[in-house]
Amino acid sequence: RIGGAILARFSMGRPLLEGSLRAGKLHEHCNLHRCGFTTSNAQKRRKKRLKVRLSKSKESKGSKSTKKSNQQDKVLTQTELMMKNLSDFAEQEAELLEERRKAIDKIGPEVGEDRDTELVAVQQEAVAMLQRVLKEADDKLNPIDPKERYKTLPLDTDHFFAALGLPEELKSYNKVIHACAMRGELKKGMEAFEELKKNSAFEPDVYTYSSLILLQRANPGALGVTQALRLREEMYDNGVVPNVNTFGALITVCAKAKDAKRVDALLKEMDEARMAPTPKILTSVLDMYINMNDIPKAWDSYYELVFKGVTPNDVTLCTMLRACAARREVERGLALMNDMKMDHITPSQRAYNHAIILCSKRQDTYLQGFDIFAEMCNEGYTPDNYTLSGLLLCCARAGDVANAMRVCRQFIRTYGMSLDSSHYEHLFNTISTSMELPPVDLYTPSKDEAMEYTGYYGAEASKRRKQNQELSAPESRKDRLKLARGIMSDMKETGVQPTIRVLNQYLRVFTGAAGPPARTGPDKIQKEGGGEEELREAEAMFDALYDEHGMKKDRFSYFYMLRMYCDRRGEEENLERFLDRMKSKDKVAIDKPEYLLLLERYARQEHYEAFLDVLHEMNQKQIEIPKRWVRQGKQMVDEILHARERKREERAIEKASAASMVSVDNEAIKSRVRLENVKLENNGQRGR
């Protein structure tokens, strides 16, 4: 079909008959060979000679390239292999035609071949058309992100037109401005608009102004909104009527600046103009409210715009799954996903990845992430790095080390995927969380539950029991530390450069091992906790780990060390020494998370004076104090005042009792003196 279309367009005044094209009898008009190239016996002989020359030049390159191409072809799908063969064919034909043209220029046309030069030019045009068709097909099979489409091209209009082969017309200027808007190149976009103004042959249209308004996203905050509104006024002054794209660009700029009132006003203008919002507008509005952390308003806007007739798409689903993840509303997000499936909206791989990350927000729903992963594989999607990250986040939420290691092995062996720094970070996070939480106990239905339902639930119960038996994870803290060291050594062997987040999670493994025992229920015994050996190892690693990789510690590095000291019993001297180091030596600002750790420690120790000092320091720095600690601080103050009142009362009672005893003694002495005086008087009288 490609060959017929090419010959029909480039037949040099000899158009092919429509009937023969339909019947496929192209040989009645010309001999077709290799996608529609006309050949005669003399031309065949000449082409054979050219092929011999090309084959001799290619033999010198060796057979390594053919072996590599054969290995690559095994990985390609059937469609990709067909496209590759066609593109290879087009390249070979282009080389042959170039050699033929040079030979004709050198020796001249042979006898009976007066039109050789003309035919070569026609065939070169045909090959060029074939290459353009293949490029368009490749763009459809492998779509490029609009933000990346013009990323490598210089945004100067001359270079842009030359690189893309665009004519110098209004549509080309609009493409340049839109490319600048997608890349955030404000200065270059405005320069292209000024060049358009200088060209008197063109006048800016609605698409030009829509791209210019979208370009104002690069301006910070309210400045972008002001410039976008100014461009709209200029648009009205020039007599250009706005369309849906114009309102979409305005809403996008206002949503980026979090100007909710302006967005509502623009939506009302669209209603008055009887313009239906597009799914892109819906996504921009939802993104604004999610970034403002106003999740209820995001849901209200979603229902309102869907009621007005906006059809949600896959991008809308991903945005609403983000909203559910912000509030840990796993059930609501999965229900929305099922509703969209009922409306024949097929979730994309990105939507499945968002759903897996949503399930990782709660410990009781992390196993549902694996069910969504199985559903995604059944839909024919190939897992990517984001899928692996979502599954590892699910394992990290519950400290499920066994499942995390099993998932990594599966992705490496089955999908040929290599781990990156974020995957190692999630693995260390899983190990450290397993030291803080009780051991993972996968749900196993009881015998009554298994007998109550059908055989499916009984089979599922036995399957889950078997999984519980197969899953094995390091139980003691020493084994987990050994596993973490092995993962770090594997990371170095594979050449993955650790980031500061990876080092922080690796440090957290050792600080967690030196911390208190895992939190368990009242019926379980806390068997082990961190000892002095783990404490010294964590302290030694705090300085050596970051110096080894040439990185500077951040606030999370100090936070994990401070939490280790706060969780351990005693360690008052080490805690005070570390706080002094943070404040004086390393100049690390103590913020709300660190203060909350200190409050929890002092409240557990009933150290009222230090607790109130921390509250006072937070109040001086104007740090928001949680209501829980405010109430506990008031209770402490009340207890202190009540204790002081009791001491005052006791002291007053002691003083009063002491005074009453003195008065009683004085009365006794006086009574004795009276008695003695009476006796003396009696004796005197007797003596007299």
Image: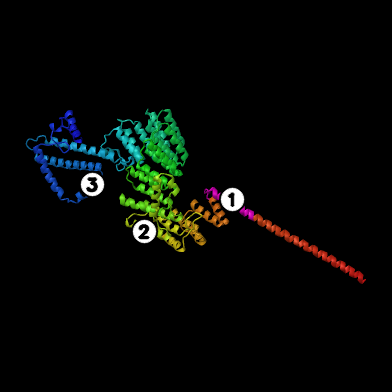
Which image quadrant is residue 140 in?
top left
Badge 1 crowding class, 10 Å Cα cut-off, few under 14, some 14 to 19, many 20 or more, is few
The label nearer to you, 3 versus 1, is 3
- Which colour assignment does the render follow? rainbow
Which image quadrant is residue 20 in?
top left
Asked if labels 1 and 3 touch by Cβ distance under 8 angstroms, the answer is no
x and y percentages locating residue 321 in the rendered image = 41, 42
Tag 1: amino acid:
Lys
Is residue 78 located in the magenta-colored stretch of the structure?
A: no
For residue 540, above or below residue 197: below
Q: Name the residue under label 2.
A: 486
Q: In which quarter of the image is the C terminus?
A: bottom right
**588 vs 417, nearest the viewer:** 417
For mark 3, give the secondary structure.
helix
For mark 2, give the secondary structure.
helix
Q: Name the residue under label 1.
A: 634
Q: In which quarter of the image is the N terminus?
A: top left
Tag 3: amino acid:
Asp
x and y percentages locating residue 374 in the rendered image = 36, 45
Left or right: residue 78 versus residue 490 is: left
Q: Quick one: label 1 or label 2, which is nearer the N terminus?
A: 2
Q: Name the residue under label 3.
A: 73
Is residue 626 located in the magenta-colored stretch of the structure?
A: yes
